[in-house]
């Protein structure tokens, strides 16, 4: 490996930090983002590629309905797409597809302003590419959760074939236009190289939503060179945290014949430059705050209080996709320990664990589901008295008003991930507490812990301290709760989802060009 030495040019500084430049100091709104898109994207075709569709349609009582409440990613990228009439390419899912012969459908359904183009996968492709290589291989590889990655050669072949299928669709969509391709996540690591090989002038960026492991861990993957080569087809690679960027640059420098600058987080490979930058993702603070105050949420709070017997209870809450990285057994053990240590809170504290099962045809997820059933049964049978059960488990898909009502009813919310790129549940809890109340117990192994420093930060493996944090959250004076929550709300309000999208787009359109110019002027290190 050779380190690149850059001269001090304008617009790029060593130890690049987020949130220090002028455009980062402001409060970003949806309208700001839309203005920025019109300015930066101009006449280029903007194409977003992700595994998951932004909108899913299903037939309900004979009527076609849009079933997907906009999740974080859709909320972040929708305004961007709506401002430039782009195309969002994704795998087709759901029951019914009101698409034309090329797989296109106008979205949002109520007032279409851009195209969603669907890629169809066979069951075998879905199994090998999504469940196999992406979620039994890359997902555990990138998370320190002690679940061994499975690398199966058939899954890898399918992953490659599906990435090619997505690339063919993207190239067909681009035609002869100037284009920007923004790829999401670890399912499509090979796509950028496949695009660049055919169309070197396309501007390519990718955001990796999960952590990037250390080089020692990444080298477990038998196809590490191919994956890195694919990702370095990007002009810009985005991660949540600086630490992920550092790990990525180190991995490249140990694996490929590339020149890297750890100081500037730049990789030079095959005569192309890739910028590696942190963009901590967030939520639509104002929207969540407004939704939390809706009359439907008030009604839902009354219903839940009644049905679950929460009237006189201190409510604790966990909302998670049921995943082994989220540390759900660890939090249950901490609750058990808290109940052992503090019998005075029996019949006074209830913990609600909500969130649907996911990736259920993977063995590790089935085992987790069984483990949770056993743990909850054990804790409930150990401590229940009369109608009171300490844990209420709701492992099903719930309407968004129910999630919102639970957030508002909670005295404390637990996010105990063993490793998590960011964790939006923590930020959603904060954004929904317009009353400035509620305590967040947060794992230091989440990206969110770097911003939400007023949470009670506790190691999920340290059961004793975890139990003490639960005790602290139920005994914390109101003044302290409000002051901590107020501080966290200011942070999430400012570092909102529009800031994330705007910074990503600005860096893709301006930062990459600026760096290429600087590289041409200042590259001093020879190839090894
Ligand atoms: C990846 C990274 C990163 C949860 N259960 C249900 C449900 N949710 C919602 C939450 C939240 C979202 O799903 C989950 O987001 P997270 O950030 O917590 O986690 P991942 O799914 O693992 O996401 C993560 C994220 O990408 C974004 O970059 O933060 O680190 O792992 O919005 O509220 N939503 C519905 N039903 C559920 O049962 N509808």
Image: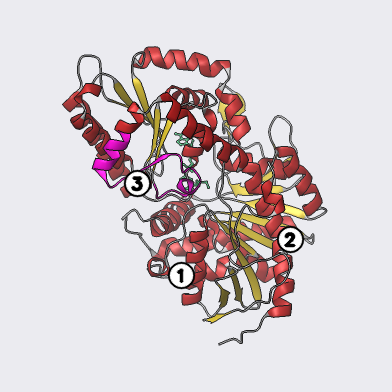
Residue drawn at (53%, 29%) of the image: 432
Label 1 CB-ligand 1 distance < 8 A: no
Is residue 161 visible to the viewer in this orientation of the structure?
Answer: yes
Which residue corresponds to the image point at 35% horizontal and 60% vertical from the top-left?
A: 150
Q: In this image, 156 relative to 432: left or right? A: left
Label 3: element kind: helix
* Residue bearing mark 2: 510
Secondary element at image label 2: helix
Residue 360, above or below 476: below
Q: Quadrant of residue 235?
A: bottom right
What is the CA distance from the residue labelled 2 to the residue labelled 3? 39 Å
Lower position in the chain sequence, tag 2 or tag 1: 1
Find residue 18 and report its horizontal and vertical position in percent: 61, 55
The answer to which of 90 and 299 lies nearer the viewer is: 299
Residue picked out by circle 3: 324
Is residue 118 at all visible to an observer of this figure? no
Q: Earlier in the sequence, mark 2 or mark 3?
A: 3
**Spatial CA span between label 2 and label 1:** 30 Å
Location of residue 321 with respect to 155 vertically, above or below: above
Residue lying at the far right in this picture: please name it.
Answer: 43
Provide the residue designation for mark 1.
224
Which element type, helix, strand or loop, lies under badge 1?
Answer: helix
Q: Which residues are magenta?
A: 444-470
Mark 2–mark 1 contact, CB under 8 Å?
no
Name the quadrant containing residue 304. Answer: top left
């Amino acid at each position: 490996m050779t380190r690149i030495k850059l001269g001090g040019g304008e617009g790029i500084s060593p130890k690049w930090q987020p949130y220090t430049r002028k455009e980062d100091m402001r409060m970003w709104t949806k309208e700001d983002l839309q203005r920025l898109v019109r300015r930066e994207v101009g006449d280029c075709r903007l194409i977003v590629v992700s595994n998951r569709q932004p909108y899913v349609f299903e037939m309900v009582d004979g009527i076609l309905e849009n079933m997907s409440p906009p999740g974080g990613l859709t909320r972040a990228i929708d305004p961007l797409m709506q401002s430039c009439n782009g195309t969002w390419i994704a795998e087709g899912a759901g029951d019914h597809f009101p698409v034309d012969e090329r797989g296109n459908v106008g979205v949002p359904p109520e007032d279409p302003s851009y195209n969603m183009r669907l890629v169809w996968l066979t069951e075998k492709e879905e199994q090998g590419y999504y469940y196999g290589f992406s979620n039994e291989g890359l997902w555990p590889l990138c998370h320190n959760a002690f679940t061994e990655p499975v690398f199966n050669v058939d899954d890898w072949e399918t992953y490659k074939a599906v990435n090619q299928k997505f690339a063919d669709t993207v190239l067909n969509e681009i035609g002869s236009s100037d284009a920007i391709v923004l790829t999401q996540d670890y399912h499509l690591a090979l796509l950028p190289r496949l695009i660049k090989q055919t169309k070197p002038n396309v501007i390519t960026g990718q955001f990796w939503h999960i952590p990037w492991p250390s080089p020692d861990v990444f080298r477990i993957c038998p196809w590490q060179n191919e994956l890195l080569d694919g990702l370095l087809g990007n002009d810009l690679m985005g991660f949540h945290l600086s630490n992920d960027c550092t790990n990525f640059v180190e991995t490249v420098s140990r694996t490929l014949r590339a020149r890297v600058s750890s100081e500037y987080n730049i990789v030079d490979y095959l005569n192309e430059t890739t910028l590696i930058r942190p963009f901590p993702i967030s939520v639509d603070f104002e929207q969540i705050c407004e939704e939390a105050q809706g009359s439907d949420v008030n009604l839902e709070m009354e219903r839940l209080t009644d049905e679950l017997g929460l009237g006189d209870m201190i409510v604790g809450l966990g909302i998670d996709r049921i995943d082994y990285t989220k540390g759900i057994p660890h939090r249950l053990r901490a609750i058990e320990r808290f109940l052992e240590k503090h019998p005075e809170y029996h019949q006074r504290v209830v913990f609600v664990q909500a969130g649907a099962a996911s990736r259920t045809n993977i063995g590790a997820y089935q085992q987790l589901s069984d483990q949770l059933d056993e743990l909850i049964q054990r804790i409930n049978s150990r401590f229940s008295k009369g109608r009171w059960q300490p844990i209420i488990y709701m492992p099903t898909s719930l309407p968004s008003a129910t999630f919102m009502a639970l957030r508002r009813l909670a005295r404390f919310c637990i996010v105990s991930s063993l490793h998590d790129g960011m964790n939006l549940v923590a930020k959603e809890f904060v954004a929904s507490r317009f009353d400035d109340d509620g305590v967040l117990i947060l794992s230091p192994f989440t990206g969110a812990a770097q911003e939400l420093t007023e949470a009670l930060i506790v190691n999920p493996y340290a059961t004793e301290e975890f139990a003490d944090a639960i005790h602290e959250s139920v005994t914390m004076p109101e003044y302290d709760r409000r002051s901590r929550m107020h501080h966290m709300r200011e942070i999430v309000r400012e570092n909102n989802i529009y800031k994330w999208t705007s910074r990503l787009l600005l860096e893709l359109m301006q930062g990459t060009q600026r760096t290429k110019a600087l590289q041409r002027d200042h590259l001093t290190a020879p190839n090894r």
